[in-house]
Structure formats: C-alpha cells, structure tokens
Image: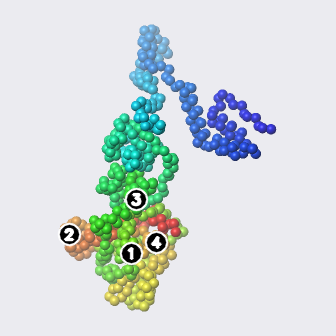
C-alpha cells in the first residue's frame, strides 16, 4: 500500500514541508528517474536555505514591527505634570523622579527619533524615460557604497557596438565584494548622468572622484555565470614594477606596484596581457593589475631589438676576501662550463634568435623536515665582505650543526695537514678528469696549483645531517639551484661609507679592518655590490649588511636558526619533482 501523506498544520514552515515531501519520494519502477530528480532538487541545501529566508521575511511582514507610539517623550512630560499637581505617595514620588531624570528623558527622545524613521529598504525607482531600444532588455540599477578606495573595475569601449562595457573586475575590490557588477556588463549611466558618449578615461575619472553612494544603470551581460576561483599560483617577482610609469597599463590606478623579490599571489589569469595579483603580506584585500609573463617578456624583447634597452652583460665580481691562500685563489677561479658566461637575467636562444627574459618565478612555501637533508646555505658577497671569515666563525662556534665542503687541491700536503680536513689532496690527472666529468662547482689555479669545490664534498656534509655553508662566486649558483640542494642564498654586503673620511671615523680597533681604504677602493666596493645585486639579486633570499664582524656573525646564526624553523618560499620545481 502507498504510504499516506502526512498532515500539515497551518504553522508548518516551508522548509519543514520540503523535508516531509522529500521523505515521501520513494522511487518506483515507472517513474524512477523523475522521482530521483525531484528528490535531488528538493534535497539541495541551497533550496532549504532559501525556504528559511522566505519564512523569516513572512514573519517580518506578519509581525509588522512598528513602534507603539512616536511621542514617548511628550507622554512622559504629561504624566510628570499630572503627578506634580497632586499629593504623591511613595511609588508616585519614585515615578516622578525617574521621569524627570535627564538620562530617562534622553532615552525617550532617542526612542521617538528612531520610531519616526522608516527602516525598510528603499530601492531606487526605475526611470520613466527609458530608451525604446531598452524595452526588450533587462536593465539593472546598482547602488554601490564607495570609500576612498578605487571602485575596483576597469572599463573599455566595445570595438563593434561602441558600448562602454566592464572590462575586468578586480578581485577583492568594492565592485567584486558587491557581487552586482560583472565583466561584460554595459554601463549606461553614472549617478543619473548618461555616459554613452564619454571617453573611457572620462568615465573612470567620474568614478574615481565619486564618494559615498554611486548609482549605476547597467545592462547585464548575457553570458554564463562567472565561476572563477582564486588561483593558488604564487610568483616571485624578478623585476621592479611601477604602474604610474607604465603607459601600456589599462588603468594606472588599478596597477599593483612591486619590487624585485616580492611574492605575488596571482588570483586571475583570465586576461592574457594583464593578470590580477596581490602582494603576500599586504593588508590590502583588493587585487591589482600586473603585466603577464608573456606580455612582459615580449615587450622587453622588443626593447632589446629596438636598442632602447641593453641586455645586462655578465661581469665578474671582484675578489671577495683579504689576501690569504684561499682568498687569492678565489681571484683566479674560472668556471668550466661555457654556458655560465650568459647573464642569469636574459639568455639568448640560438634557434629562434629571440631573448627570453626571466620576469617571474613560480614559488611555493617549503618547510624543512627533520627527516630530510638540510638545505644548502650559499654565501655570496661583494668586494670587502670577507665572507670566508664570517663562515669560519659560525662553523667554529657550532661544528656539530654546521659544516663546510672540503675543497680539492693538487698541491702537496704539508706536514701538519690531514687528508679530508683542510683539503682533499689529489693528482693533477685526477683533477683534470674531475673537471671533464663536471664534478666541480667551481675551480681555479693559484701558484700553478689547482683548487676546486666539488659537488660530492657538499653532499658529504649534508649526508651527515649538517647544514653545509659554502661561499662561492655567484655564477656558480646556476649549478646549485636544483631540487637536490634547495640552496638558501645569503648576500653578505659590507657597510660601505659614503666617503673616505667617514670610513676613517667608522674604523674600530677591534673591527679587524687593517690598512687604509682609498676613495678608489670605496668606489670599487660600491660598484661590486651594485653589479652583484643587478645580475644575481633575484636569486638572493636574505641580505646581510656586515658592519661589525661579531654582530654579523650573530645575525647569520639567527638567519640559520630561522631557516630550520620557519617555512621559506622556494621554486615549485624544487618540490614538485
């Protein structure tokens, strides 16, 4: 037998009725597909929410929440006057005292003010003089509340129809948060002013200068609902960008300025030329426009071909340390692979003859795990940084946690030296064979002896679960920037005084800086730092300004400790392998 329908009382809510109806839908043999469809529709959570909202609105209408009277203050004055004219008992005296209290009078006055206002939502009326061409079209009146922030939308004129349409909605902006304006909507009026014959820049100026409430007359775009989701793509910027200096940007006010090294979250790549992004750590929720990777590479290539922009040439960073055996051989290091002579910011394609500029690098957060080998720490420095001394001091303070890659050499072993401690001592034939096998990160010759740092010596330190610290020429970064080593690069930069006089004043007896620094040497130090930052700054994770050796050593220890504890941004290729 068919189960009887439940009896519904007049007080049964719509959502309750929907639940009862759903429970009665038992698919039979004849109408199984139809009943399954109805069951799925009636069981939809969003439909249940709509029913609840409908019930609340009906309750609001039935209750008609209106004040009992609009003049409570006047009534209180009348009652107080009557009480003052007669003999008063205990309760009457207390009532009179309350009615004449300033606080009670103020409350009743506020009550009357609120009671006389109408709080029902007021929608702007549709204009009576709609154009004939709009009679068959859906017209939407949108009222937005705008503060000092931009509206968060850009407009353009359609090439075919000439209509002013919404070109893009900036994620997180006022227009996006309202949910009332969409890409492709045709804009007809702004605050009652017809804008069909105005230029887009004039309309943008009207919108940017408007404050408070903005009323827009819009013809909605006929297209599927935008179902975009925020992207989880994060990019490290490899160049500086200032929107107000970019004439190509569709809206300078909507642009997002950033510096090289900033982490950007790209929330929309719908436009192949202009992406929408936010700076990680920025409190501003509204996205801004940035040039897309392809567009930025294309125009930089065009500038290079037209001669308006010169490709940065590779330059050897000068010596890094004061004269000693290792510092002197550092000056003579020459890298083995031919492709290391190209600049890291632009590489030439021999097949196409075009240049490929590196403008963004996709990154992700990486947390060092105890079960995984530590990350390699790479120290690079400009002239005068003395990074070998800094590295040795940190390792000497904690040799169980930090280690160095023992270099190889062809010179004879001295009596006090031990194999594998100061150096790995090998023959010239073995050294040449290792060069041919690309086993060295970098190598060079000093006083007719070969010296080099091998990849295997780095692996040996990491295999002992020690953090390996290496100081190298920055050109060698291209060998080490792999998923195997995941290098954390620290740029040690000496504090360079403005003049020779300031340098003399700043000298400390315990600072370790002996000798006189000339103006020419100061100039070379500045140039060295500028060149390193220009060509390799986008590889740097941290800049350590070295003024005092002791303070710099403490700062380096802090950086290394944070590296183990806190997640860091690394290229996605290092993680997704």
Percent coordinates x, y for residue 115 in the rendering:
45, 24
- Choose the circle earlier in sequence order: 4 or 1: 1
Residue for badge 4: 482
Between disc 4 and disc 1, the foreground one is: 1
Whether residue 261 is visible: no
Q: Disc number at residue 350?
A: 1
- 535 vs 37, left or right, is left
Between disc 3 and disc 1, the foreground one is: 1
Q: Disc number at residue 292?
A: 3
Residue for badge 2: 500
Judged from the image, the secondary structure of the residue bearing numbered disc 3 is loop
Which quadrant would residue 48 be assigned to in this image? top right
Residue at 36% from the left image edge and 36% from the top image edge: 191
Percent coordinates x, y for residue 508 in the rendering:
26, 69
Judged from the image, the secondary structure of the residue bearing numbered disc 2 is helix
Decide: is 358 above or below 117: below
Residue positioned most to the top: 86
* The N terminus sits in image quarter: top right
Q: Residues within 10 Å of mark 4 (few under 14, many from 20)?
A: few
Between disc 3 and disc 2, the foreground one is: 3
Q: Residues within 10 Å of mark 3 (few under 14, many from 20)?
A: some
Q: Residues within 10 Å of mark 2 (few under 14, many from 20)?
A: some
Q: Are marks 3 and 2 in contact (CB under 8 Å)?
A: no
Q: Marks 2 and 1, Cα distance to the nearest angstrom?
A: 47 Å
Decide: is 230 above or below 423: above
- Choose the circle earlier in sequence order: 2 or 1: 1
Residue at 34% from the left image edge and 80% from the top image edge: 330
- Choose the circle earlier in sequence order: 3 or 1: 3
Residue at 20% from the left image edge and 69% from the top image edge: 500
Whether residue 411 is visible: yes
Closest to the observer, 187 or 70? 187
């Amino acid at each position: 037998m068919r189960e009887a329908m439940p009896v519904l009382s007049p007080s049964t809510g719509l959502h309750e009725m929907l639940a009862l109806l759903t429970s009665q839908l038992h698919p039979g043999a004849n109408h199984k597909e139809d009943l399954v469809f109805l069951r799925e529709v009636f069981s939809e959570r969003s439909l249940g929410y709509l029913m609840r909202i409908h019930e609340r609105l009906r309750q609001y209408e039935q209750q008609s929440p209106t004040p009992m009277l609009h003049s409570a203050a006047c009534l209180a004055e009348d009652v107080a006057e009557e009480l003052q004219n007669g003999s008063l008992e205990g309760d009457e005296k207390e009532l009179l005292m309350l009615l004449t209290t300033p606080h009670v009078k103020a409350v009743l006055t506020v009550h009357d003010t609120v009671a006389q206002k109408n709080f029902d939502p007021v929608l702007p009326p549709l204009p009576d003089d709609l154009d004939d061409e709009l009679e068959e079209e859906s017209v939407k009146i949108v009222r937005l509340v705008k503060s000092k922030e931009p509206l968060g939308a850009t407009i353009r004129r359609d090439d075919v129809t000439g209509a002013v349409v919404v070109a893009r909605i900036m994620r997180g902006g006022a227009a996006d948060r309202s949910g009332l304006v969409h890409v492709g909507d045709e804009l007809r009026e702004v605050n009652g002013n017809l804008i069909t014959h105005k230029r887009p820049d004039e309309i943008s100026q009207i919108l940017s200068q408007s404050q408070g409430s903005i009323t827009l007359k819009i013809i909605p775009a006929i297209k599927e609902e935008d179902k975009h989701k925020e992207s989880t793509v994060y990019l490290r910027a490899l160049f500086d960008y200032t929107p107000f200096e970019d004439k190509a940007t569709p809206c300078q006010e909507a642009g997002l300025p950033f510096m090289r090294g900033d982490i950007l979250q790209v929330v929309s790549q719908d436009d192949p030329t202009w992406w929408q992004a936010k700076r990680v750590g920025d409190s501003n929720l509204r996205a801004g426009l940035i040039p897309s990777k392809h567009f930025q590479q294309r125009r930089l290539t065009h500038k290079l071909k037209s001669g308006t922009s010169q490709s940065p040439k590779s330059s050897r960073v000068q010596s890094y340390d004061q004269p000693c055996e290792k510092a002197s051989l550092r000056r003579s290091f020459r890298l083995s692979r031919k492709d290391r002579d190209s600049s890291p910011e632009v590489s030439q394609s021999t097949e196409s003859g075009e240049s490929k500029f590196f403008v963004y690098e996709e990154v992700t957060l990486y947390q060092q795990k105890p079960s995984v080998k530590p990350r390699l720490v790479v120290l690079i420095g400009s002239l005068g940084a003395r990074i070998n001394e800094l590295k040795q001091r940190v390792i000497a303070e904690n040799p169980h946690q930090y280690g160095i890659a023992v270099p190889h050499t062809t010179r004879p072993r001295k009596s006090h030296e031990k194999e594998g401690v100061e150096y790995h001592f090998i023959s010239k034939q073995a050294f040449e064979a290792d060069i041919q096998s690309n086993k060295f990160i970098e190598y060079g010759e000093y006083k007719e002896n070969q010296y080099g740092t091998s990849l295997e010596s780095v692996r040996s330190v990491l295999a002992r679960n020690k953090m390996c610290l290496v100081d190298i020429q920055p050109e060698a970064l291209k060998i080490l920037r792999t998923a195997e080593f995941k290098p954390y690069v620290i740029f040690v930069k000496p504090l360079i005084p403005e003049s020779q006089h300031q340098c003399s004043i700043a000298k400390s007896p315990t600072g370790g800086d002996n000798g006189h620094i000339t103006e020419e040497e100061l100039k070379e130090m500045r140039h060295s730092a500028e060149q390193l930052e220009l060509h390799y700054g986008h590889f740097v994770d941290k800049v350590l300004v070295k003024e005092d050796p002791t303070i710099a050593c403490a700062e380096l220890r802090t950086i290394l400790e944070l590296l183990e504890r806190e997640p860091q941004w690394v290229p996605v290729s290092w993680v997704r392998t």
